[in-house]
Image: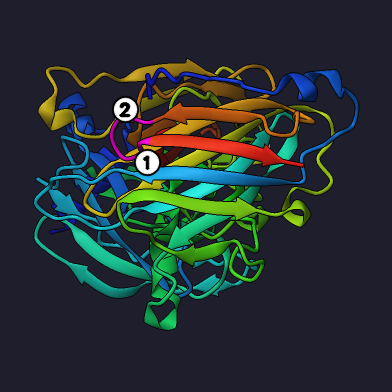
Amino acid sequence: MTTLRARLLAAALGTVAIAAPLQAHRLWVLPSTTIVSGDDDWITFDAAASNDLFFPDHQPLRAEPAVIQPDGTPGKVEHVNIGQYRATFDLHMVQKGTYKLVVQNGGVMGSFKLDGKEQRLPRGTKPDQLATAIPAGATDVKLTESINRNEVFVTAGAPTQTVLKPTGVGLELVPVTHPNDLVAGEPATFRFTADGKPAAKLTITVIPGGSRYRKSVDEKTFITDAAGQVAISWPAAGMYWINATTTTPSAAIPNADKRMSYTAVLEVLQP
Amino acid sequence: MQLRHHLILTGTAAGLIAAGPAAAQSVDLSITVPRLSVAEYHKPYVAVYLEATGAPARTLSIWYDVAKAKNEGRKWLNEVRGWWRASGRTGNYVSDGSSGATRAPGVQKISINAARLGGLKPGQYTLVVEAAREVGGREVVRLPFSWPLRPGQTIQAAGKTELGAVSATFKP
Protein backbone atom coordinates (compact mmCIF):
# COMPACT_ATOMS: atom_id res chain seq x y z
CA MET A 1 0.00 0.00 0.00
CA THR A 2 2.73 2.39 0.93
CA THR A 3 4.36 1.71 -2.40
CA LEU A 4 1.14 2.37 -4.27
CA ARG A 5 0.53 5.55 -2.38
CA ALA A 6 4.03 6.72 -2.98
CA ARG A 7 3.65 5.97 -6.66
CA LEU A 8 0.31 7.71 -6.74
CA LEU A 9 1.80 10.71 -5.08
CA ALA A 10 4.75 10.73 -7.41
CA ALA A 11 2.46 10.36 -10.40
CA ALA A 12 0.30 13.18 -9.19
CA LEU A 13 3.29 15.39 -8.72
CA GLY A 14 4.74 14.50 -12.05
CA THR A 15 8.08 14.41 -10.32
CA VAL A 16 11.08 12.99 -12.04
CA ALA A 17 11.98 10.82 -9.08
CA ILE A 18 10.21 7.81 -10.57
CA ALA A 19 10.32 6.43 -14.08
CA ALA A 20 8.70 8.66 -16.66
CA PRO A 21 5.74 6.45 -17.72
CA LEU A 22 4.15 6.83 -14.29
CA GLN A 23 3.73 10.50 -14.97
CA ALA A 24 0.86 9.52 -17.20
CA HIS A 25 -1.31 9.17 -14.09
CA ARG A 26 -2.94 12.50 -13.60
CA LEU A 27 -4.68 13.44 -10.40
CA TRP A 28 -8.02 15.15 -10.75
CA VAL A 29 -10.98 16.28 -8.72
CA LEU A 30 -13.94 16.50 -11.07
CA PRO A 31 -17.10 18.41 -10.09
CA SER A 32 -20.45 17.35 -11.53
CA THR A 33 -20.99 21.03 -12.29
CA THR A 34 -19.28 24.25 -11.30
CA ILE A 35 -22.31 26.52 -11.27
CA VAL A 36 -25.59 26.12 -9.40
CA SER A 37 -28.55 28.46 -9.25
CA GLY A 38 -30.97 27.05 -6.69
CA ASP A 39 -31.50 27.75 -3.02
CA ASP A 40 -30.39 24.38 -1.65
CA ASP A 41 -27.90 22.85 -4.06
CA TRP A 42 -25.34 20.07 -3.88
CA ILE A 43 -22.40 19.39 -6.14
CA THR A 44 -20.90 15.91 -6.28
CA PHE A 45 -17.27 15.17 -7.06
CA ASP A 46 -15.21 12.28 -8.39
CA ALA A 47 -11.51 12.23 -7.57
CA ALA A 48 -8.84 9.90 -8.86
CA ALA A 49 -5.50 9.53 -10.53
CA SER A 50 -5.82 7.97 -13.95
CA ASN A 51 -4.32 7.68 -17.39
CA ASP A 52 -7.24 9.15 -19.31
CA LEU A 53 -9.07 12.27 -18.14
CA PHE A 54 -11.59 11.81 -16.50
CA PHE A 55 -11.82 8.04 -16.61
CA PRO A 56 -11.01 6.40 -13.27
CA ASP A 57 -8.79 3.43 -14.04
CA HIS A 58 -5.96 3.57 -11.55
CA GLN A 59 -6.19 4.93 -8.00
CA PRO A 60 -8.73 6.92 -5.98
CA LEU A 61 -7.81 10.15 -4.26
CA ARG A 62 -7.25 9.12 -0.65
CA ALA A 63 -7.21 12.55 0.95
CA GLU A 64 -10.29 14.53 1.95
CA PRO A 65 -10.20 17.98 0.37
CA ALA A 66 -10.28 21.09 2.48
CA VAL A 67 -13.17 23.43 1.70
CA ILE A 68 -13.01 27.21 1.79
CA GLN A 69 -16.49 28.73 1.83
CA PRO A 70 -17.45 31.99 0.11
CA ASP A 71 -17.08 33.90 3.40
CA GLY A 72 -13.56 32.55 3.84
CA THR A 73 -14.39 30.14 6.65
CA PRO A 74 -13.57 26.42 6.39
CA GLY A 75 -16.33 24.10 5.26
CA LYS A 76 -16.54 20.35 4.82
CA VAL A 77 -17.28 17.84 2.11
CA GLU A 78 -19.85 15.17 2.93
CA HIS A 79 -20.56 11.54 2.02
CA VAL A 80 -16.90 10.76 1.46
CA ASN A 81 -16.43 7.37 -0.12
CA ILE A 82 -13.13 5.94 -1.28
CA GLY A 83 -13.76 3.29 -3.88
CA GLN A 84 -11.45 1.04 -5.79
CA TYR A 85 -10.78 3.48 -8.60
CA ARG A 86 -12.19 6.78 -7.48
CA ALA A 87 -13.26 8.69 -4.42
CA THR A 88 -16.57 10.50 -4.32
CA PHE A 89 -17.83 13.24 -2.04
CA ASP A 90 -20.47 15.95 -2.04
CA LEU A 91 -20.54 19.63 -1.21
CA HIS A 92 -23.65 21.21 0.26
CA MET A 93 -23.87 24.80 -0.98
CA VAL A 94 -25.06 26.53 2.17
CA GLN A 95 -23.66 29.93 1.22
CA LYS A 96 -23.96 31.98 -1.96
CA GLY A 97 -20.77 32.64 -3.87
CA THR A 98 -17.59 30.82 -4.85
CA TYR A 99 -16.18 27.85 -2.93
CA LYS A 100 -12.70 26.42 -3.31
CA LEU A 101 -11.78 22.79 -2.65
CA VAL A 102 -8.09 22.18 -2.00
CA VAL A 103 -6.08 19.01 -1.76
CA GLN A 104 -2.63 20.00 -0.63
CA ASN A 105 0.19 17.64 0.13
CA GLY A 106 3.92 17.64 0.23
CA GLY A 107 6.80 17.57 2.62
CA VAL A 108 10.30 16.35 2.22
CA MET A 109 11.15 13.35 0.11
CA GLY A 110 14.59 11.89 0.33
CA SER A 111 16.98 9.20 1.36
CA PHE A 112 20.15 8.76 3.34
CA LYS A 113 22.63 6.02 4.10
CA LEU A 114 23.15 4.68 7.60
CA ASP A 115 25.71 1.98 8.20
CA GLY A 116 25.92 1.46 4.45
CA LYS A 117 22.16 0.83 4.08
CA GLU A 118 19.94 3.25 2.16
CA GLN A 119 16.84 4.43 3.99
CA ARG A 120 13.97 6.61 2.79
CA LEU A 121 12.37 9.39 4.74
CA PRO A 122 8.81 8.66 5.88
CA ARG A 123 6.16 10.16 3.61
CA GLY A 124 5.00 13.60 4.64
CA THR A 125 8.08 14.51 6.62
CA LYS A 126 8.11 18.26 7.21
CA PRO A 127 11.28 20.36 6.92
CA ASP A 128 11.28 21.08 10.67
CA GLN A 129 11.20 17.34 11.41
CA LEU A 130 14.41 16.65 9.53
CA ALA A 131 16.65 17.06 12.56
CA THR A 132 15.02 14.06 14.21
CA ALA A 133 14.17 12.13 11.03
CA ILE A 134 17.78 11.90 9.90
CA PRO A 135 19.93 10.19 12.53
CA ALA A 136 23.40 11.37 13.42
CA GLY A 137 26.02 9.68 11.28
CA ALA A 138 23.81 9.48 8.21
CA THR A 139 25.62 10.00 4.92
CA ASP A 140 24.63 10.59 1.31
CA VAL A 141 21.62 12.66 2.36
CA LYS A 142 19.48 13.53 -0.66
CA LEU A 143 16.48 15.73 -0.02
CA THR A 144 13.74 17.35 -2.08
CA GLU A 145 11.06 19.55 -0.64
CA SER A 146 7.71 19.37 -2.40
CA ILE A 147 4.36 21.08 -2.25
CA ASN A 148 1.44 20.20 -4.45
CA ARG A 149 -1.93 21.86 -4.76
CA ASN A 150 -4.99 20.51 -6.45
CA GLU A 151 -7.94 22.89 -6.60
CA VAL A 152 -11.52 23.09 -7.80
CA PHE A 153 -13.77 26.15 -7.82
CA VAL A 154 -17.56 25.99 -7.72
CA THR A 155 -20.13 28.76 -7.41
CA ALA A 156 -23.66 29.11 -6.08
CA GLY A 157 -25.32 32.14 -7.64
CA ALA A 158 -22.94 34.94 -8.63
CA PRO A 159 -19.16 34.38 -8.50
CA THR A 160 -17.31 35.98 -5.58
CA GLN A 161 -13.65 36.77 -4.95
CA THR A 162 -12.86 35.82 -1.34
CA VAL A 163 -11.55 32.30 -1.98
CA LEU A 164 -9.40 33.44 -4.90
CA LYS A 165 -6.81 35.12 -2.67
CA PRO A 166 -3.52 33.22 -2.82
CA THR A 167 -1.94 31.87 0.34
CA GLY A 168 1.63 32.64 -0.72
CA VAL A 169 2.63 29.00 -0.25
CA GLY A 170 3.58 26.79 -3.19
CA LEU A 171 2.51 27.19 -6.78
CA GLU A 172 -0.86 28.91 -7.07
CA LEU A 173 -3.29 30.16 -9.66
CA VAL A 174 -4.46 33.71 -9.03
CA PRO A 175 -7.47 34.26 -11.25
CA VAL A 176 -7.82 37.44 -13.24
CA THR A 177 -10.71 35.90 -15.12
CA HIS A 178 -12.96 34.22 -12.58
CA PRO A 179 -12.52 30.41 -12.80
CA ASN A 180 -16.30 29.95 -12.79
CA ASP A 181 -16.81 32.37 -15.66
CA LEU A 182 -15.03 30.54 -18.47
CA VAL A 183 -16.59 30.39 -21.91
CA ALA A 184 -15.40 28.67 -25.09
CA GLY A 185 -13.89 31.19 -27.48
CA GLU A 186 -13.09 33.72 -24.74
CA PRO A 187 -9.49 33.57 -23.52
CA ALA A 188 -9.10 33.48 -19.74
CA THR A 189 -6.29 35.33 -17.97
CA PHE A 190 -4.66 33.71 -14.96
CA ARG A 191 -1.62 34.71 -12.94
CA PHE A 192 0.62 32.10 -11.37
CA THR A 193 2.71 32.63 -8.27
CA ALA A 194 5.40 30.48 -6.67
CA ASP A 195 5.52 31.09 -2.92
CA GLY A 196 3.75 34.38 -3.54
CA LYS A 197 6.14 35.64 -6.22
CA PRO A 198 5.24 35.85 -9.93
CA ALA A 199 6.01 32.53 -11.65
CA ALA A 200 7.52 33.74 -14.92
CA LYS A 201 8.13 31.48 -17.92
CA LEU A 202 6.03 28.75 -16.33
CA THR A 203 4.58 26.17 -18.71
CA ILE A 204 0.86 25.60 -18.21
CA THR A 205 -0.46 22.35 -19.63
CA VAL A 206 -4.13 22.28 -20.60
CA ILE A 207 -5.90 19.04 -21.52
CA PRO A 208 -9.60 18.72 -22.34
CA GLY A 209 -11.49 15.85 -20.69
CA GLY A 210 -12.68 12.84 -22.65
CA SER A 211 -9.23 11.91 -23.96
CA ARG A 212 -10.37 8.27 -23.97
CA TYR A 213 -12.58 9.10 -26.95
CA ARG A 214 -9.95 10.90 -28.97
CA LYS A 215 -7.02 9.72 -31.00
CA SER A 216 -4.71 12.13 -29.24
CA VAL A 217 -4.44 13.75 -25.83
CA ASP A 218 -4.76 17.19 -27.49
CA GLU A 219 -2.73 18.88 -24.81
CA LYS A 220 -1.87 22.53 -25.25
CA THR A 221 0.78 24.48 -23.45
CA PHE A 222 0.87 28.14 -22.55
CA ILE A 223 3.78 30.04 -21.04
CA THR A 224 3.46 32.76 -18.43
CA ASP A 225 5.01 36.18 -18.99
CA ALA A 226 7.34 38.07 -16.64
CA ALA A 227 4.43 38.89 -14.35
CA GLY A 228 3.41 35.22 -14.20
CA GLN A 229 0.38 35.96 -16.32
CA VAL A 230 -1.00 33.85 -19.14
CA ALA A 231 -4.03 33.97 -21.45
CA ILE A 232 -5.51 30.52 -22.00
CA SER A 233 -7.85 29.84 -24.89
CA TRP A 234 -10.52 27.14 -24.78
CA PRO A 235 -11.39 25.66 -28.16
CA ALA A 236 -14.64 24.08 -26.97
CA ALA A 237 -16.89 23.79 -23.94
CA GLY A 238 -16.10 21.02 -21.47
CA MET A 239 -14.07 20.09 -18.43
CA TYR A 240 -10.37 20.90 -18.65
CA TRP A 241 -7.41 19.72 -16.57
CA ILE A 242 -4.68 22.27 -16.13
CA ASN A 243 -1.32 21.68 -14.56
CA ALA A 244 1.98 23.43 -13.96
CA THR A 245 5.15 22.41 -12.17
CA THR A 246 8.26 24.31 -11.24
CA THR A 247 11.43 23.75 -9.26
CA THR A 248 13.27 26.36 -7.22
CA PRO A 249 15.97 26.14 -4.57
CA SER A 250 14.46 25.30 -1.20
CA ALA A 251 14.43 28.09 1.35
CA ALA A 252 13.88 25.67 4.21
CA ILE A 253 16.54 23.06 3.42
CA PRO A 254 20.06 23.96 2.36
CA ASN A 255 21.24 22.51 -0.95
CA ALA A 256 17.83 21.02 -1.73
CA ASP A 257 15.32 21.69 -4.47
CA LYS A 258 11.72 22.64 -3.89
CA ARG A 259 9.31 21.10 -6.38
CA MET A 260 5.94 22.71 -6.66
CA SER A 261 2.92 21.65 -8.69
CA TYR A 262 -0.50 23.09 -9.29
CA THR A 263 -3.48 21.25 -10.75
CA ALA A 264 -7.05 22.34 -11.30
CA VAL A 265 -10.12 21.12 -13.14
CA LEU A 266 -12.00 23.95 -14.81
CA GLU A 267 -15.36 23.95 -16.52
CA VAL A 268 -15.70 25.89 -19.76
CA LEU A 269 -19.25 26.59 -20.87
CA GLN A 270 -20.82 27.24 -24.24
CA PRO A 271 -21.31 30.90 -25.10
CA MET B 1 -24.90 29.16 -32.70
CA GLN B 2 -24.43 29.77 -36.39
CA LEU B 3 -27.96 30.96 -36.70
CA ARG B 4 -28.87 33.39 -39.35
CA HIS B 5 -31.41 35.88 -38.24
CA HIS B 6 -33.48 38.14 -40.37
CA LEU B 7 -33.75 41.55 -38.97
CA ILE B 8 -36.65 43.51 -40.32
CA LEU B 9 -37.17 47.04 -39.25
CA THR B 10 -40.46 48.56 -40.11
CA GLY B 11 -41.75 51.96 -39.26
CA THR B 12 -44.43 54.32 -40.33
CA ALA B 13 -43.60 57.34 -42.41
CA ALA B 14 -45.10 59.45 -39.66
CA GLY B 15 -42.70 57.93 -37.23
CA LEU B 16 -39.79 58.79 -39.47
CA ILE B 17 -40.89 62.37 -39.83
CA ALA B 18 -41.59 62.79 -36.16
CA ALA B 19 -37.97 62.51 -35.31
CA GLY B 20 -36.78 63.38 -31.86
CA PRO B 21 -37.26 61.85 -28.49
CA ALA B 22 -40.57 60.15 -29.23
CA ALA B 23 -39.35 57.18 -27.25
CA ALA B 24 -41.39 54.04 -27.15
CA GLN B 25 -43.04 53.51 -23.81
CA SER B 26 -43.64 49.79 -23.80
CA VAL B 27 -42.80 46.77 -25.83
CA ASP B 28 -45.14 44.01 -26.88
CA LEU B 29 -43.32 40.76 -27.37
CA SER B 30 -44.46 37.78 -29.35
CA ILE B 31 -42.47 34.60 -28.78
CA THR B 32 -43.26 31.39 -30.59
CA VAL B 33 -42.58 28.26 -28.60
CA PRO B 34 -42.47 25.52 -31.23
CA ARG B 35 -44.40 22.31 -30.84
CA LEU B 36 -41.76 19.60 -30.86
CA SER B 37 -42.26 15.94 -31.55
CA VAL B 38 -39.80 14.41 -29.12
CA ALA B 39 -39.88 11.40 -26.80
CA GLU B 40 -39.91 13.48 -23.63
CA TYR B 41 -41.20 17.03 -23.86
CA HIS B 42 -40.90 19.66 -21.17
CA LYS B 43 -41.90 23.27 -21.58
CA PRO B 44 -38.80 25.42 -22.01
CA TYR B 45 -37.38 27.89 -19.58
CA VAL B 46 -37.27 31.19 -21.50
CA ALA B 47 -35.38 34.35 -20.64
CA VAL B 48 -35.88 37.73 -22.29
CA TYR B 49 -33.14 40.23 -21.57
CA LEU B 50 -31.57 43.37 -22.86
CA GLU B 51 -27.89 43.65 -23.67
CA ALA B 52 -25.88 46.80 -24.31
CA THR B 53 -22.15 47.23 -24.61
CA GLY B 54 -20.63 48.61 -21.45
CA ALA B 55 -23.75 48.21 -19.35
CA PRO B 56 -25.10 45.36 -17.27
CA ALA B 57 -27.70 43.21 -18.97
CA ARG B 58 -31.27 43.67 -17.82
CA THR B 59 -33.74 40.84 -17.31
CA LEU B 60 -37.13 41.63 -18.79
CA SER B 61 -38.78 38.28 -18.31
CA ILE B 62 -37.86 34.80 -17.13
CA TRP B 63 -40.21 31.84 -17.39
CA TYR B 64 -39.43 28.88 -15.18
CA ASP B 65 -40.98 26.38 -12.84
CA VAL B 66 -42.13 28.99 -10.34
CA ALA B 67 -44.77 26.79 -8.71
CA LYS B 68 -42.40 24.08 -7.49
CA ALA B 69 -42.15 23.63 -3.75
CA LYS B 70 -39.18 25.18 -1.94
CA ASN B 71 -38.21 27.15 -5.05
CA GLU B 72 -36.82 24.00 -6.59
CA GLY B 73 -37.44 25.35 -10.06
CA ARG B 74 -34.62 27.79 -9.52
CA LYS B 75 -32.17 24.91 -9.44
CA TRP B 76 -32.32 24.76 -13.23
CA LEU B 77 -32.15 28.47 -14.00
CA ASN B 78 -28.45 28.28 -14.83
CA GLU B 79 -29.35 26.00 -17.74
CA VAL B 80 -30.46 29.22 -19.44
CA ARG B 81 -26.74 29.74 -19.70
CA GLY B 82 -26.37 33.00 -21.57
CA TRP B 83 -29.00 34.74 -19.48
CA TRP B 84 -27.64 33.31 -16.23
CA ARG B 85 -24.21 34.73 -16.97
CA ALA B 86 -25.42 38.05 -18.35
CA SER B 87 -28.11 38.88 -15.86
CA GLY B 88 -29.59 36.01 -13.87
CA ARG B 89 -26.88 35.29 -11.37
CA THR B 90 -26.72 38.85 -10.13
CA GLY B 91 -30.30 39.86 -10.66
CA ASN B 92 -33.25 40.01 -8.33
CA TYR B 93 -35.60 38.48 -10.89
CA VAL B 94 -37.47 36.57 -8.23
CA SER B 95 -38.88 39.60 -6.52
CA ASP B 96 -38.96 42.17 -9.30
CA GLY B 97 -41.96 40.78 -11.12
CA SER B 98 -40.13 39.54 -14.20
CA SER B 99 -40.49 35.86 -13.38
CA GLY B 100 -43.40 33.76 -14.44
CA ALA B 101 -44.41 30.19 -15.15
CA THR B 102 -43.22 28.25 -18.18
CA ARG B 103 -45.50 28.47 -21.20
CA ALA B 104 -46.93 25.91 -23.56
CA PRO B 105 -46.08 25.64 -27.27
CA GLY B 106 -47.75 28.30 -29.39
CA VAL B 107 -47.47 32.04 -29.82
CA GLN B 108 -46.91 33.61 -26.43
CA LYS B 109 -47.44 37.32 -25.87
CA ILE B 110 -45.96 39.46 -23.15
CA SER B 111 -45.90 43.18 -22.65
CA ILE B 112 -43.00 44.97 -21.01
CA ASN B 113 -44.12 48.25 -19.53
CA ALA B 114 -42.42 51.62 -19.51
CA ALA B 115 -41.11 51.26 -15.98
CA ARG B 116 -39.09 48.21 -16.94
CA LEU B 117 -37.63 50.01 -19.93
CA GLY B 118 -37.09 53.25 -18.11
CA GLY B 119 -33.72 54.89 -18.03
CA LEU B 120 -32.42 53.50 -21.30
CA LYS B 121 -29.81 55.79 -22.77
CA PRO B 122 -29.79 56.31 -26.54
CA GLY B 123 -27.59 53.70 -28.18
CA GLN B 124 -27.33 50.20 -29.58
CA TYR B 125 -29.09 47.36 -27.76
CA THR B 126 -29.87 43.74 -28.33
CA LEU B 127 -33.05 42.12 -27.17
CA VAL B 128 -32.14 38.52 -26.42
CA VAL B 129 -34.61 35.65 -26.18
CA GLU B 130 -33.08 32.43 -24.91
CA ALA B 131 -34.83 29.09 -24.43
CA ALA B 132 -33.52 26.00 -22.67
CA ARG B 133 -35.54 22.83 -22.39
CA GLU B 134 -35.15 19.96 -19.92
CA VAL B 135 -33.80 16.91 -21.77
CA GLY B 136 -33.67 19.17 -24.80
CA GLY B 137 -31.65 21.88 -26.42
CA ARG B 138 -30.91 25.52 -25.98
CA GLU B 139 -31.30 28.36 -28.46
CA VAL B 140 -30.67 32.07 -28.43
CA VAL B 141 -32.37 34.57 -30.75
CA ARG B 142 -30.96 38.08 -30.90
CA LEU B 143 -32.81 41.20 -32.04
CA PRO B 144 -30.53 44.21 -32.32
CA PHE B 145 -32.04 47.68 -32.32
CA SER B 146 -31.09 51.25 -31.65
CA TRP B 147 -32.77 53.25 -28.93
CA PRO B 148 -34.84 55.39 -29.01
CA LEU B 149 -37.13 53.59 -31.39
CA ARG B 150 -39.77 54.99 -33.61
CA PRO B 151 -43.17 54.32 -32.15
CA GLY B 152 -44.73 51.36 -33.88
CA GLN B 153 -41.40 49.99 -34.97
CA THR B 154 -41.21 46.20 -35.01
CA ILE B 155 -38.10 44.09 -34.83
CA GLN B 156 -38.18 40.40 -35.51
CA ALA B 157 -36.08 37.30 -35.88
CA ALA B 158 -36.62 33.56 -35.73
CA GLY B 159 -35.01 30.54 -34.17
CA LYS B 160 -34.65 27.13 -35.73
CA THR B 161 -35.00 24.58 -32.97
CA GLU B 162 -36.12 25.66 -29.52
CA LEU B 163 -37.67 28.95 -30.61
CA GLY B 164 -39.83 29.99 -33.53
CA ALA B 165 -40.58 33.53 -34.67
CA VAL B 166 -39.84 36.27 -32.16
CA SER B 167 -40.95 39.86 -32.60
CA ALA B 168 -41.06 43.00 -30.55
CA THR B 169 -43.27 46.00 -31.27
CA PHE B 170 -42.59 49.28 -29.53
CA LYS B 171 -45.60 51.29 -28.47
CA PRO B 172 -45.64 55.02 -27.82
Return the residue at label 1: A139
Q: Is residue A229 left or right of residue A27?
A: right
What kind of residue is marked 2? Ile
Residue with the most extreme front position: B14
Is label 2 in a helix, a strand or a loop? Answer: strand
**Quarter of the image where the C terminus of chain B is located:** top right
Task: Give the crowd class for mark 1: few <14, some 14-19, many >=20 residues within 10 Å.
Answer: some
Q: Which residues are magenta?
A: B159-164
Q: How is the image coloured?
A: rainbow
Q: Nearer the viewer, residue A226 or A175?
A: A175
Quarter occupied by residue A64: bottom left
Q: Nearer the viewer, residue A239 or A129?
A: A239
Residue A145, given in percent of the width and then of the height, sits at 46, 43
Residue shown at the point (25%, 34%) measured from the top left: A209
Return the residue at label 2: A207
A111 in magenta: no
